[in-house]
Amino acid sequence: MYNFSMFESLRTQKLSRKLLLLTMGFVMLAELLIFIPSAAVFRQDWLVERSQQAGLLAQALTGVTDYDGGDMLSQHFMDATDAVMMSTKRDGMTELVLGMPPESSEFELVDLRNLKRLPRFRDAFRSFFGNPEGYLRVVSESPVEGQSTLEMIIPKGKLQWAMRDFFERVAWLSLIIAIITAALIYCAMLVLIIRPIENLAKDLAEFRKAPEVRRNASPPGQRKDEIGQLQHEFYDMKQSVRASFKQKERLATLGLAMAKINHDLRNVLTSALLVSDRISMNKDERVANMGERLARAIDRGVKLTAEVLNYSQSKEEPPKLSNVALAPLIDEAARDTLEGFGTGQRQITFKNSIAADLSIRADSDHTYRIFSNLFRNAGQAMASLRDDFAVRELSVYTDIERQDKETVFVNIYVQDTAEGLSKRAEANLFQAFKASTGHGNTGLGLTISKELAEAQGGALVLERTSLEGTVFKVTLKQG
């Protein structure tokens, strides 16, 4: 429960405080990992230092004939090394130099004759955490000629106290180093990361509340690191979002005006539809045929204005699917759309290679609008060719794509012989007001055609474009 509360408290802190606490914690952890081998080395050095003092005492006592002087050196050695007894071994015989053997029989042998550069951690843990009762029997080589070894008896508690005192000093030093290191890192990170992120978070909150208000239009600094990249990306995002809001505001105003125009236009087209019906009843067959064509065109215009009004009111009119003969529909769309594009040498040739018995499962009015838009774009592109003798041909052909046993699609290809799309038009294809090819298009035709194809379960894609022409592919289900 304590650990959970500690981490929960750390989680709710600010990033700057987290950084400060984590830095101190990591430094202390590193010092702890360093302390373990350091404690093992300290223990060995502590024992080696006392064995060296014992060796010096043995040399001094060998050369001192005055008993009082020897007794003074012995007492000073015992006070400095905490040893209770020291002995030497000569010719296999043990000679007591000072002190008396303790009554306790609990001894731990420590042999310093074969020292290692890195002592065993286990011995250091046992000396630090073990039972302080008992004694250490420290064996080392003697520097006195004729003596083979030196032995000392040292209480375990003295070594344990020395190691814990060493730990306390290292702990305080590590804490000071951790505080200083954390403070330096905190100041550096505060300037490089924390403050920029706080300012960025503040700007983001203000932008979320009112994205259309320009509070700080100045561009970000010249930083090239990740923070600088984040600042530049956020600045670019704000610019693009504000531009999008501005465009939507203009489109909303334009949509309101279009709704009013379409409302009045629908009334005008309805009246024209009555007139065209009367013309279609004329006794002259040619006039009657023209009247029928005019009636169909006006009827599509009325439906189009109704759809625009529904769109402005966020109403989606679902397609009414039925089996539609594809070839006659393509011929009608080409005949109504390509008239008026080019005369004489600039006349556009239309070639329909679709089988007469091929039908599709689609909405006839929506499909008519798809190909009408494609034919109009192709006609405008070919009409703008400067060479009077250039080939101007619009061809439509199909192939069958079987997805599974029950689902069959018809791929309808619309190919022109214009000079192809520009890089800009190709990059912004199917985006309203951005896909203009410079031939009087606004990009709405392709956008609407793509939506109409997808609404019928199909697709509209750019198959290829080059200087030899452009090919669009319309995919619809077979009827």
Image (spheres, rainbow, N blue to C red):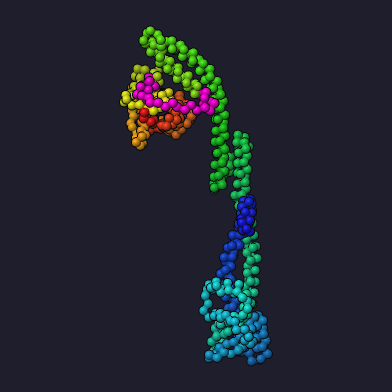
| Residue occupying the point 60% across, 38% down | 208
Q: Is residue 41 above or below residue 137?
A: above
Q: Can residue 338 be seen here?
A: no
Q: Is residue 305 above or below residue 145?
A: above
Left or right of residue 361: residue 254: right
Q: Position of residue 426 (x, y in %)?
A: 43, 32
Q: Is residue 328 above or below residue 241?
A: above
Q: Position of residue 361 (x, y in %)?
A: 39, 28
**Count of numbered circles in the view:** 0
Q: Position of residue 369 (x, y in %)?
A: 43, 24
Q: Position of residue 196 (x, y in %)?
A: 61, 46
Q: Is residue 118 magenta?
A: no
Locate the C terminus and report the quarter of the image it occupies: top left
**Residue 365 is drawn in which quadrant?**
top left
Q: Nearer the viewer, residue 323 or 28?
A: 323
Instruction: Find the magenta span and give its range.
Output: 308-335
| Residue occupying the point 48% across, 19% down | 302
User: Residue farthest to the front?
Assistant: 406
**Residue 228 is drawn in which quadrant?**
top right
Left or right of residue 160: residue 430: left
Left or right of residue 279: residue 68: right
Q: Nearer the viewer, residue 363 or 342?
A: 363
Q: Is residue 329 magenta?
A: yes
Q: Can residue 476 be seen here?
A: yes
Q: Is residue 132 above or below residue 62?
A: above
Q: Nearer the viewer, residue 297 or 58?
A: 297
Left or right of residue 149: residue 279: left
Q: Nearer the viewer, residue 300 or 253?
A: 300
| Residue occupying the point 60% across, 44% down | 200
| Residue occupying the point 62% across, 58% down | 1
